[in-house]
Every structure is written in C-alpha cells, then in structure tokens.
Image (spheres, rainbow, N blue to C red):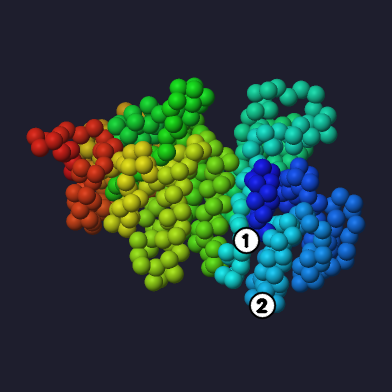
Amino acid sequence: MKQQLIKYAKAGYPGLFLVTHEEARAEAELKAAAGEIGYKLHAWSITAGLIDTESGASSNIPDPLAALEATDNLPERSLILMHDLHLFFEDGDPALMRKLKDTLRLAKASGKMLVLLGCQAKLPPELERELVTLEFALPDKEAIAPVLDGIITSAEITELGEELGDAALDASAGLTTVEAENAFALSVIETGGIDPAVIAREKANALQSNGLLEIVEAKESADSIGGLDQLKEWLGKRRNAFGQAARDYGLPSPKGLMIIGIPGTGKSLTAKATASVFGLPLLKLDAGKLFGGLVGQSEANLRSALGTAEAISPCVLWIDEIEKGFAGAGSSGNTDGGTSARVFGAFLNWMQDKTQPVFVVATANDVSQLPPEFLRKGRFDELFFVDLPDMKERTAIWDIVIKKYGRDPLDYDTVRLSHATERFTGAEIEQTFIEALHLAFDEDGEPGELTVGTALTEIVPLHSLMSEKIEKLRHWAQGRTRNASHRDRPANGKRKLDV
C-alpha cells in the first residue's frame, strides 16, 4: 500500500478514500509514504483537531468545514489524513461538499493530497468521481508476524517452535492486526501459550460478527458421500494443487467448482467434503446478506467478503444455492436499481481475475435463474450435475446413514432397502431412517426393516412432486455438464441419466 500511495502522490492526485478497519496500520503506512517522498503528514479528527504528526502541534478545529479551510493554508507537499469526514456527507450538507471540491482543486494546484479514512466508502454522487477509492488489504502473515513476536516477548514465552508459529499465523490469516493481537493475547491467558485452535475460534467469531462469512467446521470427508465417484475422483486429483510443489511445477491454483442438481442429492455435503479433501479451511458466504439498503453498501460488502477470503487463502469458499443469492442479476434492474447486476458482475470479474488460491464451490438447484455468462468456462474449472442416486449409490447411502446414527449396516438388507427407495434422494433416505428411529424409540425398541418399511410410507419423494422440473433439469444438463457419477452412455454418446 505504501508504494501505491507514493505513486498517487507523485502523480498529483488531490484526494483518495482509503477503506479500512485498521486506522493505526493505515496511519503507519501513510506516515512511511510521506517520509519517503518528503511530504509532511497532518491528521484531522473531530476529537483531536488538526495535528502536525511530526512536531505534535495541534489546532482545536472540531468543525469539518473549518478543518478543510485550515488545510488550504498548509504548506505544499503536505499529506492530510481526514478521519471519518465521509460521515458528515450523509446529511447532504451542500456547503461541506462544495468546500471539499474547492479544497481538492487547490490541493491539485499546490502539491497536496487529502486522504479520507473510513471503514466503508459511502459518498454522495456529487463526490464519487472526486476521490479515488482504495481498499486497504487485510494484513498478510508477514505483517502479523511482528504482532505475534510482540505477544511472545511480553508473555515471556521462551520456546515457540517454527511449526507452531506458522500454524498460529495461518490461524490468524483474515484478521486485522488488532484482532490478531487480541486473539494471541487471549490464547496466552487461556492456555498459557500460543494455541492455533483458540486463534481460529476467535477468527470464526470475528467473521461471523458481520454475517457475511462464517467458518464452517468441515467434519465430512469424501467417505461421507454415497456415490458421486466421478466428482470425488476429480477432487482427489486436485488435492495437492495448492502447495508449493504445485507452484514450482507451474500449475495454476484451481478456480472452483459448480455443482448443479436436484435438491437433497448431496451438493452441500460435497462442498463440505471438498474442504476436507483439500485440507483447507471452509468459508461459507451468505450471498443474500451482501445486499444493503445504502448506495454502494452491497458492492462494499462483496469486496469485504472476498478480501477476507483472499487473506485467509488458501481456502474453500462455499456459496450455497447461489441462484437465490444473486436472483435478479439478469433483470433490467427495475426492481433494485441494478444493484444485483452490479454485484453479480463484480463477483464474475473476481472469479475470472483472482490470483489468490480461493477455491469456490457454488451449488444451484435452479439453473434457469443463472445468467449464461456465469456458467461459461473460465469462471469455474468444471460444472458437475448431480442426479438422483442409482441402485449402487442408494445402497452406499443406506450404509452411511445407518452407520451415522450408531447402527450396524450389516443388520439391514441395504440392497433391498435400495430397491424400495428408488427415485429417493440421499436426504430422503436419511429422513426415512430418522423417521424409523422415532417410531422405534416410541415403541422402546430398535428400528428393524419392518419399522423402516413403515417409515417409507410416510415419505413422499421429491420426484413425485417435481417430476417435470427434474426432467427439465436433466435435459438441460445433457451436453452442458459432467455427471458427478459414472453412468453408462447410450449409443448416441450422451450420458444415460438413471432414474
């Protein structure tokens, strides 16, 4: 960031908007940039007034309009940091907006640069083109390492192995320096040392506080999925593609995976298992929560979420039912002023251009709501279609479900149960066994095949309710996607989709 600030100052830019939650770190970068190019750094806030950061001299100027007037009298080659100035524009004060424009024009002529600092770029339309907005990236491991060293020194921790130190830095990726310092300190208080598990827990709390991202504990593995052998094989071949050996080989990091299919067939389960296969943390993005009521808030939320994912990378970013989160992206914008389309376009650009190893797993049930440009090659490495499980897959699902609920699959004829649950999804098979458990528990017994048979009569499979929609989805998938399961091909070369 320092070099970027220097370039803008040398180019004569009069104003920047620096978006960050880390005021202290941003101030340090600005001070370093000013010192390198011979600028004097001044800072203003409503509480401290206007301060010369070098001499410490201050002027008690809490009024923002008076503060802008005072900056006009500062010497050339001054860099002026304005804290929270953007908040005063929310009321649409025309005098303040006009004064900022005049000050920027004067700064351009006198070799000065104003830097507005805030956690969210919210400017009225009159000022949007007056300032260049810069996102201050979250700190990388090199930036957090001195923070960890400081905690180790202050806590008088004599031994911290390199492996444990690296694990702690990995666990803190995606936090601000202040959040990382707090997490390290809490770890010392709770455990007497540096514990990556405590740091990861605090990171999860920090991510969940804004409601956009959450860290999901991926307990599922590839063995938790019944069938989908072709998809699991594809994932297995990429499990080592995020390491240094892959980079030395010249292999680009995998971009992501799109899973389309019938509800209840294991798409979400596969997203969780992907993180386990790759050995990476799993983040879940709630696309619906990206959209805010203020102008520019939705785009800012997306940038914040994706920036956090990149800071934590390598990681898996899971977007469940993505067609619902971005509903309206292909419309004319009459319903939301084009916000969905802009956010969706920004996400597509990020998918196309991202260089950080963030593997995106997106799932969708209704492809009719997805714009065609979302599905083209280059966005995702592969598109997979998940159909209803066939006979062999249903048998495997029965084995997994029975074992999951503490029973022995050998006590059941799972092949017979597989025949009885033709056209059932995996979720419906699990719900059938749960219903059998309830029936058996009520009778103070164990669920046998007769109990499971009774439970089957209570379940109406999705295929019976949505057969036309399922057939339409299957027809769309032919020739456009790879089947997640190995299925026989008919003579015409198209995949045969078992029912």
> Label 2 to label 1, Cα distance in Å?
17 Å
In-front residue for pair 446/26: 26
Q: Determine which quarter of the picture holds residue 337.
A: bottom left
* Residue named by callout 2: 94
Q: Horizontal placement of 474 versus 313: left or right? A: left
Circle 1 sits in a helix, a strand or a loop, which is it? loop
Q: Position of residue 198 (x, y in %)?
A: 66, 37
Q: Position of residue 160 (x, y in %)?
A: 73, 24
Task: Look at 51% across and 44% down and name the residue there.
Answer: 283
Give the position of the N terminus as an image quadrant.
top right
Task: Look at 57% across and 39% down and name the residue there.
Answer: 312
Q: Amino acid at mark 1?
A: Leu
Task: Look at 36% across and 35% down and name the residue there.
Answer: 225
* Residue named by callout 1: 131
Mark 1 Cα-neighbour bin, 10 Å: few <14, some 14–19, many ≥20: some
Give the position of the C terminus as an image quadrant.
top left
Q: How many marks?
A: 2
Q: Horizontal placement of 345 versus 447: left or right? A: right
Image vertical order of residue 156 relative to residue 174, above or below: above
Q: Position of residue 243 (x, y in %)?
A: 50, 26
Q: Amino acid at mark 2?
A: Pro
State the residue lying farthest toward the left. 491
Circle 2 sits in a helix, a strand or a loop, which is it? helix
Q: Position of residue 357 (x, y in %)?
A: 49, 36
Tag 2 and tag 1, C-beta contact below 8 Å: no
Tell which circle, 2 or 1, labels the residue nearer the N-terminal end. 2
Asked if residue 27 can be seen in this view, the reply is yes
Mark 2 Cα-neighbour bin, 10 Å: few <14, some 14–19, many ≥20: few
Task: Look at 35% across and 50% down and name the residue there.
Answer: 374
